[in-house]
Amino acid sequence: MQNGGKKKLGYLALVATSFLWGTTWVASKIGVSEMSAFQLAGMRQAIGGTLLVGFYMLVRKEKLPNKKQFRQLVVMSLLMFVVANTVSTWSLKYITTGLGALVGALYPLNIVLIDKFFFKKKNFNILTLVGFFLGILGIGIVFYGSFHPLNIWGFIIGMAMAIIANISWSVGTVMISRNSININPYYSIGWQMLIASVIITVIGILTQPIIPLRDIPVHQWGVILYLVLIGSIFAFTAFIYSMKVLPHAVASLFAYFNPIVAILAASFIFPGEELTMNTLWGSIVTVIGVFLVNYSVKNMDHVIVEAEI
C-alpha cells in the first residue's frame, strides 16, 4: 500500500481510537450498575488476556516469560490493571462518567510530577504551571457541576478511587518507559491481563457479591464483550497502527478526545449526566490544561504512547 493510503488508514485508526476508547467509560458505567467492579474487571481481563496470550503462543509461537520477565509482568499487572483499571471502573459507581474520564485524562500531569521530584528532571516552566492550574481548575468546575449535597460521601469515595487509579496508571507508565520487559508488547499486555484477572477475581470473591455466570443478564455479557473486543483489542490495534504510520504528535491527539466522547455519550444514555455548561467548560479547560503540560515538556511522546497501553 502506498504511503498516502497508509496515512488515510492511520487517520481512520486515530478516529476509531478516539471514539472507541471514549465509549469504554460508558460501557464500564453500565457494567458496574449491576455487577461488582471486581467481577466485571476480572472477567474482562480474563477473556482479553486469554485471547491475546493464546494468539501469540499458538500462532506467533511466543515462548513463556522467564522468571525475571514474569516478576516484571506481575508488578505491571498490579499497577495497570488491578489498581488502575479496576479501581477506576469501581469509581464509576459513585461519580459521573465524564468526571471519571476527565480525572483519567490527567495522568500526564502526574508523570511530569514523578519525573520532576523522583528523577530530578528539569521539566517545569511557566506554561507547564499554567497547564497544571487549568487541568485542576477544569476538574473542579466539572466536580462542582456534578456535585449533589445528598451524596457527599459517595463523591468523596469516587474521587478518591479515581485519583488513586490515576496515580497507579502514571507510576506504571513511568516504569514501562524506564524498564523494558523485552517481550512483545501485545503478548506482555495479555499476560498482565491474565495475571490481574486472577488477583482481581480472588479479591472480588472475598469482598463483593458475585453473580453466577448463568445469572448474568444478556446485556451485561454484551458490555463485557464490548470492553474486551472493542476496548481492549480492536481500539488498541487501531492505536498501534496509527502510531506506526502517523507522526506521534498527531497520533496522540486521541487522548484529548477520549473524555469528550465519554461525556457526550454519557449525556445521551444516563439520566442525571446531561451535558451542562459546567461539564462543557470544565472539560474544555481540563483538556487545554493537559495539552499545555504535554506541549511544554520536551520528549513527552512516551507519556502518551505508554499510558494508554
Image: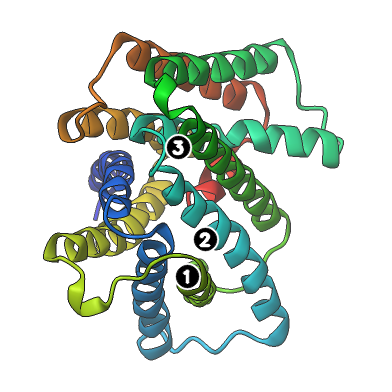
Q: Is residue 180 left or right of residue 8?
A: right
For label 3, the crowd category at 10 Å Cα-Cα, with few meaning under 14, some 14 to 19 and many 20 or more, is many
Q: Mark 3 is on which residue type?
A: Ser
Q: Secondary structure at mark 1?
A: helix
Q: Is residue 167 above or below residue 263?
A: below
Reading the image, the residue beneath label 3 is 252
Q: Mark 1 is on which residue type?
A: Met
Which residue is rendered at x = 63% and y = 49% of the image? 168
Q: Residue furthest right?
A: 120
Reading the image, the residue beneath label 2 is 81
Q: Nearer the viewer, mark 3 or mark 2?
A: 2
Q: Mark 2 is on which residue type?
A: Phe
Percent from the top left, x then y, of residue 202? 51, 76
For label 1, the crowd category at 10 Å Cα-Cα, with few meaning under 14, some 14 to 19 and many 20 or more, is many
Q: Is residue 25 left or right of residue 187?
A: left
Q: Secondary structure at mark 2?
A: helix
Mark 3–mark 2 contact, CB under 8 Å?
Answer: no
Percent from the top left, x then y, of residue 75? 67, 67
Residue 58 visible within the image: yes
Q: Nearer the viewer, mark 3 or mark 1?
A: 1
Q: Secondary structure at mark 3?
A: loop
Mark 2–mark 1 contact, CB under 8 Å?
Answer: yes
Q: Gap between marks 3 and 1, in whole Å?
A: 23 Å
Q: Is residue 269 left or right of residue 304?
A: left
Depth check: give the residue in front, 182 or 1.
182
Reading the image, the residue beneath label 1 is 193
Q: Residue furthest front?
A: 150
